């Protein structure tokens, strides 16, 4: 069987996606490989497929036990013999897995890195033919990565102990050039075939909001998305509790997830989210690793995360089904303080580090935080900012982010700039150090806060100079002056000082022109969307209810029944499922789907872009496929749709 046939038969894809074929060819020819692909980019296929074609058993090193179980389950469903070894298994289960592996029962074996050097596993590995070792989440091996795991270093020793070195393929979703270099160096990859595929996810709309009150803003955002499923990420456990309480009080079926809950509750809440019993989850960054829920239609960050890597990974959990999804970050400058606190605390807690290493890790973390803060403050295209970070070229504007959709006007802010800069200078001269944006804006606004008086800043001539403006506005202009290069923030202490450029404004009347946001253009778009979802409602709702019921009956997550239910124009829907269609699961649909008066042609055209030729070709395929026509509704096994799984086209 060739690789294309395997791709179709076992994975249900018509063709390879970007980068996959190159990596697979390299691995099949015994070469090392490094694949950097965004979440949802099809990384796992790059080792799953070769494993079926190579002799012996492929080893997959993965840090995520929950992901491991899901992957093994999905593979077995598709008829691929796979097993896993990790610390959550009982002794009996382990023994059984070892025995099966010895008998050659698996083509793929997933193993947690900390098991690699145990005696039992080493002797197993000596006996078996292992043509390929795939290292998932390979950035964990790098101290520069945001998720360094010392157990990953065991992989190197494990490889050295094998009688014959297999091909090694490393995969990660997030890696800057430095982390990439680290992966190659530490894993000792031999001239690996390296593929870095597109990080862009055009269906995601990015937006940064700076609400006065995050709670109100969150409730507003969620009430606009009542029938949708989403994740609200918070920086701390405490915030998760508060946000979850807030949402439940407001009548949302929300649940919570963080490392402080016991294992049973975490599992239960996660399942409630996956099965859509609680379509909203408030969570810390502990949530989401290993969760492949395709219908998450928004990810809201209640706090700014610590790095762009973390942000992109978490936000990337939205819109996995390819339909439009929102990634909204609610920014406040307090988030920077929280993030710094977390950075200093987490490196202080890590006892494995020497003082020198600790300082290096902190400096790295602060640099990453600064890049993240830059994202929240930029006025340029947000997508562009993210792609820049991952080193991918892009258009200047994307037309689908908060900044591209916002309207700006140019304003002369010279006078305001002079007031702010002069206040910065005077406060510094008085105190002998620099204060942060919050104290500065209070001073300029003329606030009576204890801190301002304590520092004697109410005695400065600039005190109350901008009393007509709200503090938030002053802060916005302070940020604006920083972006324009007149001010800079000390990354460690948060104090703000003037730069050399400030002198020209203060003493030579240099003009400060700024692009100031007028309004966002999000309004009409939301309305259009709302109108569309009204027309789609009956069939969509019927399908979702049905999916829910089947899932309950069979005791599986809803996305296993249909991973995607997508509304189309004029009330048509497509539902499809990863991997093989199963007759049993189609049957209950017959009774439940409401009927709509549309022809196959309009459905097809709405899905595939309006060519008659394409329609007739599809019709041809449809005749070849077994069409089931019951109760006036056709169920057609379609060609794989959007490169994922087989589809069920529901035709009236
Ligand atoms: Zn943009």
Image (cartoon, grey):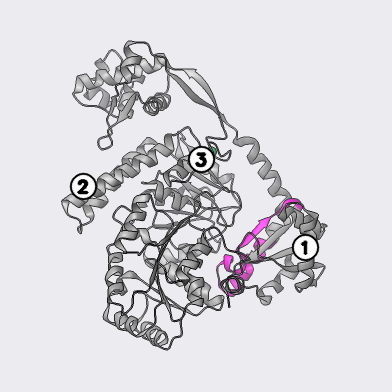
In the depicted view, which residue is nearer to us: 189 or 407?
A: 189
Q: Do the residues labelled 3 and 1 touch (CB within 8 Å)?
A: no
Of mark 3 and mark 1, the one earlier in the sequence is 3
Q: Does the magenta stretch include residue 397?
A: no
Q: Position of residue 513 (x, y in %)?
A: 45, 19
Q: How crowded is mark 2: few (under 14 residues within 10 Å), some or many (20 or more)?
A: some
Overall secondary structure of the magenta section: helix
Q: Regarding mark 3 in the picture, which secondary structure is present there?
A: strand
- Where does the image place residue 459, in percent across and percent down from the top left? 24, 15
Q: Give the range drawn in magenta.
A: 543-570
Specify the farthest residue to the left. 355
Q: Does the magenta stretch include residue 565?
A: yes
Q: Is mark 1 within 8 Å of ligand 1?
A: no
Nearest to the eye among marks 2 and 3: give it: 2
| Quadrant in the picture for the N terminus | bottom right
Q: Is residue 634 visible?
A: no
Q: Is residue 455 left or right of residue 465?
A: left
Residue to which mark 2 is pinned: 359
Tell me what residue is drawn at x 49 percent, y 18 percent.
411
Q: Name the residue under label 1.
A: 617
At x 32%, y 64%, the residue is: 187
Give the Cα separation between the discs numbered 2 and 1: 62 Å
Quarter of the rendering occupied by the C terminus:
bottom right
Disc 3 under 8 Å from ligand 1? The reply is no
Residue holding disc 3:
207
Secondary element under disc 1, as helix, strand or loop, is helix
Residue 33 is marked as none
């Amino acid at each position: 069987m060739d690789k294309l046939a395997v791709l179709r038969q076992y994975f249900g894809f018509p063709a390879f996606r970007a980068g996959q074929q190159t990596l697979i060819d390299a691995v099949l020819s015994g070469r090392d490989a490094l694949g950097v692909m965004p979440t949802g980019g099809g990384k796992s296929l790059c080792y799953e497929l070769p494993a079926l074609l190579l002799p012996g058993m492929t080893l997959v090193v993965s840090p995520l036990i929950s992901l491991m179980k899901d992957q093994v389950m999905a593979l077995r469903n598709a008829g691929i013999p796979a097993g896993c070894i990790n610390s959550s298994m009982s002794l009996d289960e382990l023994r059984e897995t070892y025995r099966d592996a010895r008998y050659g029962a698996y083509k793929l074996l997933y193993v947690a890195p900390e098991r690699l050097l145990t005696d039992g596993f080493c002797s197993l590995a000596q006996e078996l033919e292992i043509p390929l070792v795939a290292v998932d989440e390979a950035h964990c091996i790098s101290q520069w990565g945001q998720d360094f795991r010392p157990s990953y270093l065991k992989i190197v020793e494990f490889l050295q102990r094998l009688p014959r070195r297999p091909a090694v393929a490393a995969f990660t979703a997030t890696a800057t050039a430095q982390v990439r270099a680290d992966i190659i160096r530490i894993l000792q990859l031999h001239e690996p075939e390296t593929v870095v595929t597109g990080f862009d996810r055009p269906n995601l709309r990015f937006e940064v909001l700076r609400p006065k009150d995050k709670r109100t803003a969150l409730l507003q955002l969620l009430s606009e998305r009542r029938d949708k499923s989403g994740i609200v990420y918070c920086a701390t456990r405490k915030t998760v509790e508060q946000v979850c309480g807030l949402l439940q009080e407001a009548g949302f079926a929300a649940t919570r997830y963080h490392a402080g809950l016991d294992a049973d509750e975490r599992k239960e809440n996660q399942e409630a989210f996956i099965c859509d019993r609680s379509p909203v989850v408030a969570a810390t960054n502990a949530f989401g690793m290993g969760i492949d829920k395709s219908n998450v239609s928004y990810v809201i960050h209640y706090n700014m995360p610590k790095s762009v890597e973390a942000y992109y990974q978490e936000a990337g959990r939205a819109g996995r089904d390819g339909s439009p999804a929102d990634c909204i970050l609610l920014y406040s400058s307090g988030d920077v303080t929280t993030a710094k606190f977390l950075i200093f605390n987490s490196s202080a807690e890590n006892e494995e580090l020497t003082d020198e290493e600790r300082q290096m890790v902190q400096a790295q973390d602060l640099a990453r935080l600064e890049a993240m803060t830059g994202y929240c403050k930029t006025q340029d295209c947000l997508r562009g900012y993210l792609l820049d970070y991952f080193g991918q070229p892009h258009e200047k504007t994307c037309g689908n982010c908060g900044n591209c959709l916002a309207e700006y006007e140019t304003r002369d802010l010279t006078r305001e700039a002079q007031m702010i800069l002069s206040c910065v200078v005077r406060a510094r001269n008085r105190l002998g150090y620099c204060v942060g944006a919050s104290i500065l804006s209070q001073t300029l606004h003329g606030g009576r806060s204890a801190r301002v008086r304590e520092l004697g800043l109410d005695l400065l001539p600039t005190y109350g100079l901008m009393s007509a403006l709200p503090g938030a506005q002053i802060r916005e202009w302070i940020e604006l002056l920083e972006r324009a290069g007149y001010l800079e923030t000390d990354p460690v202490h948060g104090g703000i000082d003037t730069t050399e450029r400030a002198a020209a404004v203060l003493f030579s009347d240099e003009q400060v022109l700024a692009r100031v946001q007028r309004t966002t253009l999000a309004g009409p778009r939301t309305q259009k969307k709302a109108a569309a979802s009204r027309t789609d409602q009956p069939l969509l709702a019927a399908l979702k209810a049905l999916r829910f019921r089947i899932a309950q009956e069979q005791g599986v997550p809803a996305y296993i029944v249909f991973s995607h239910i997508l509304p189309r124009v004029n009330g048509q829907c497509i539902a499809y499922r990863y991997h093989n269609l199963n007759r049993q699961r189609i049957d209950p649909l017959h009774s439940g789907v409401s009927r709509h008066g549309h022809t196959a042609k309009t459905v097809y055209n709405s899905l595939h872009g309006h060519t008659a030729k394409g329609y007739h070709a599809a019709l041809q395929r449809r005749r070849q496929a077994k069409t089931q026509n019951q109760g006036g509704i056709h169920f057609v096994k379609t060609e794989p749709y959007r490169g994922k799984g087989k589809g069920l086209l529901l035709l009236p």
